[in-house]
């Protein structure tokens, strides 16, 4: 490089080249190069040189254009990768699970949060729509029904018991207790803090609104569809009021969601109790005693329709009805007389069509059924015209001669109405007791009148509802009992009917343990006799055996589930014979 010193000539290694500055005006200098005989002068700025060639400018612009295009393509490629790349397991989340992260960009975070909430609500509502909550589902047979289980604030009434659970019991498991408590409280929250869609008047202030508490909870039902969630039907009522508050909740394997909240007024709901009958006047007299206590004295919103087959016993039935009418001033009953062979489906069908006052809620009942006033309200609450029918599961009592064989005589009927394994069972294979509205019954075509003899007509009607659009509410209820009575399976029955009759007879007789003790009765008696003959004094041993059996009796009365205690009923005759020996 050539170093230039102002004011003096600069020399290079080439002696023939000299460069020297020449001062000019305008702050510029002219550098002249002298070589041989020619010379050139270059005009420069003191601070920077001018670019004399336009090609350099075009080159620079082209270079910047290429850089910009490269950046643009890189940005497009990055956006494509971000859009199409799947989420990893570490970054992904299930619907409804909000992922907490630092708030870097406020607007972006808010948008992600709202999208997550919308996805959650969409998923939960889709679960409700799939479940049988608001409308019924078409099912192929009675085995496809998912029954409800009922509960109060203290007890649960359940169908599936196995060998350890009981038909009525307090919820022992903590998760079950916590679940029911949470559901009851959630229902109270819905009632006490209604929103606009609940149909509450906006003008009603909090001070004017009637608040409900846990003590106002009457009963509830729940069932679980294993691929969707759990449905809860809750009913609340004030002690001095006639209106019920009905709340439906659904837990779609996630947080509880309100389906609906409504006020149900059953104060004017009349129930037409229809009873088909042939003979059995003693059982009818017992039925009328229960009807008098529950329907006439307590409920007072019931009409009774008795459809009697044949002439034998008809006058006695008339006398019982007239006697009750005179003593209680009750005249809301109808007696339909049919001079033909007994047919339960035919009798119920005639009783439904005999009503001429428009729409009415019907309860198809038998003369051996005992019900409470609470059950009548459950009947009103779980049947709705055009929407749902109620098929309660009856608790069927065993033969009292076996259950209470350790007593001289069985206790009164009212004292037999307990939900225990050795006293009865949930009759989940019976569909004869049902609450449904008259228009729904006529719409589906009523009973199949071609079915003759015992059984079958109730299953046919039940299947009609299952094949239709109405919701079928199936649940055990604590206030409905079937009293034991001896069954006779006639030879004229079809093979299917006879099988059902024998099965029902066996199921109604006694519990598993009691039947087992009857089967092994001879073996047990032989064992006790051997124990008696081992001592020197047989009469004294006999007395000891009597005392031993009496101890078993006390254990049964105290509710002990010891297996040997259930033998007492089967060994009552043996005890009496031992007393005779003593």
Image: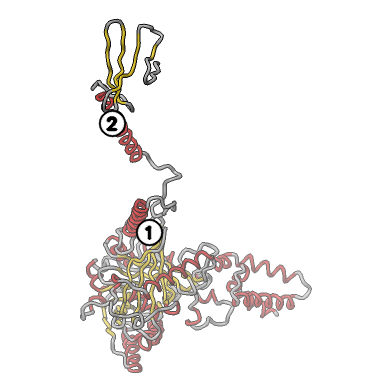
Of residue 547 and residue 164, the one placed in the foreground of this image is 164
Q: In this view, does 213 lie above or below 316?
A: above
Q: Please, what secondary structure does the residue beneath circle 1 have?
A: helix
Secondary structure state at the residue bearing disc 2: helix
State the CA–CA distance, disc 1 to disc 2. Answer: 70 Å
The residue positioned 32% from the left and 91% from the top of the image is 325
Which quarter of the picture shows residue 336? bottom left
Q: In which quarter of the image is residue 369?
A: bottom left
Q: Which of 326 and 499 is in front in this view?
A: 326
Give yes or no for contact between labels 1 and 2 (Cβ–Cβ under 8 Å). no
Residue with the mark numbered 1: 143
Question: Which quadrant does the C terminus fall into?
Answer: bottom right
- The location of residue 253, given as percent across then percent down, is 42, 58
Q: Circle 2 sits on which residue? A: 69
* Vertical placement of residue 349 versus 35, above or below: below
The picture places residue 345, in percent across and down from the top left corner, at 29, 71
Please state, as top left, top right, bottom left or bottom right, where the N terminus lies in the image: top left
Q: Can you tell which quarter of the image residue 4 is in?
A: top left
Q: Residue at x 40, y 72 (%)?
A: 189
């Amino acid at each position: 490089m050539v170093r230039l010193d102002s004011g003096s000539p600069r020399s290079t290694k080439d002696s023939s080249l000299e460069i020297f500055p020449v001062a000019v005006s305008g702050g510029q200098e002219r550098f002249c190069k002298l070589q041989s005989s020619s010379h050139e002068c270059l005009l420069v700025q003191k601070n920077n040189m001018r670019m004399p060639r336009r090609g350099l400018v075009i080159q620079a612009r082209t270079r910047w254009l290429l850089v910009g295009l490269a950046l643009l393509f890189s940005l497009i490629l990055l956006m494509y990768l971000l859009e199409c790349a799947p989420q990893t397991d570490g970054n992904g989340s299930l619907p409804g699970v909000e992922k907490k992260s630092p708030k870097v960009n406020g607007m972006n975070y808010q948008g992600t949060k709202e999208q997550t909430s919308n996805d959650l609500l969409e998923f939960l509502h889709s679960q409700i729509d799939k479940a049988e909550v608001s409308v019924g589902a078409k099912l192929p047979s009675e085995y496809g029904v998912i029954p409800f289980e009922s509960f109060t604030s203290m007890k649960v009434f359940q169908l599936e018991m196995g060998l350890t659970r009981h038909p009525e019991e307090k919820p022992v498991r903590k998760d079950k207790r916590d679940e029911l408590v949470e559901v009851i409280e959630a229902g109270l929250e819905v009632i006490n803090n209604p929103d606009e869609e609940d149909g509450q008047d906006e003008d009603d202030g909090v001070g004017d609104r009637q608040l409900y508490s846990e003590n106002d909870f009457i009963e509830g039902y729940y069932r679980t569809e294993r691929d969707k969630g759990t449905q809860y039907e809750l009913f609340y009522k004030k002690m001095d009021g006639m209106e019920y508050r009905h709340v439906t909740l659904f837990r779609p394997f996630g947080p509880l969601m309100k389906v609906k909240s409504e006020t149900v007024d059953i104060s004017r709901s009349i129930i037409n109790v229809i009873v088909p009958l042939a003979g059995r006047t003693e059982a009818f007299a017992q039925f009328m005693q229960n009807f008098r206590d529950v329907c006439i004295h307590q409920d007072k919103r019931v009409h009774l329709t008795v459809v009697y087959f044949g002439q034998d016993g008809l006058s006695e039935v008339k006398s019982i009805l007239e006697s009750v009418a005179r003593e209680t001033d009750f005249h809301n009953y109808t007696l339909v007389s049919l001079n033909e062979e007994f047919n339960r489906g035919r009798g119920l069908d005639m009783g439904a069509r005999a009503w001429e006052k428009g729409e009415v809620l019907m309860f198809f009942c038998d003369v051996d059924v005992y019900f409470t006033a609470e059950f009548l309200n459950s009947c009103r609450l779980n049947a709705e015209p055009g929407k749902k029918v109620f098929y309660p599961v009856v608790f069927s009592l065993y033969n009292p001669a076996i259950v209470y064989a350790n007593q001289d005589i069985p206790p009164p009927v009212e004292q037999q109405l307990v939900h225990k394994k050795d006293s009865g069972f949930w009759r989940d294979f019976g569909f004869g007791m049902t609450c449904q509205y008259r228009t729904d019954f006529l719409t589906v075509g009523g009973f199949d009148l071609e079915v003759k003899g015992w059984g079958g007509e109730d299953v046919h009607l039940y299947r009609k509802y299952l094949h239709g659009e109405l919701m079928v509410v199936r649940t055990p209820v604590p206030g409905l009992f079937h009293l034991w009575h001896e069954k006779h399976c006639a030879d004229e029955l079809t093979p299917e009917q006879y099988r059902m009759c024998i099965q029902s007879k066996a199921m109604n007789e006694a519990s598993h343990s009691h039947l087992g003790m009857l089967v092994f009765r001879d073996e047990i008696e032989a064992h006790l006799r051997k124990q008696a003959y081992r001592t020197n004094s047989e009469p004294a041993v006999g007395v000891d055996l009597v005392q031993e059996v009496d101890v078993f009796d006390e254990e049964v009365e105290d509710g002990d589930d010891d297996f040997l205690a259930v033998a007492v009923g089967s060994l009552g005759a043996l005890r009496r014979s031992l007393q005779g020996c003593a």
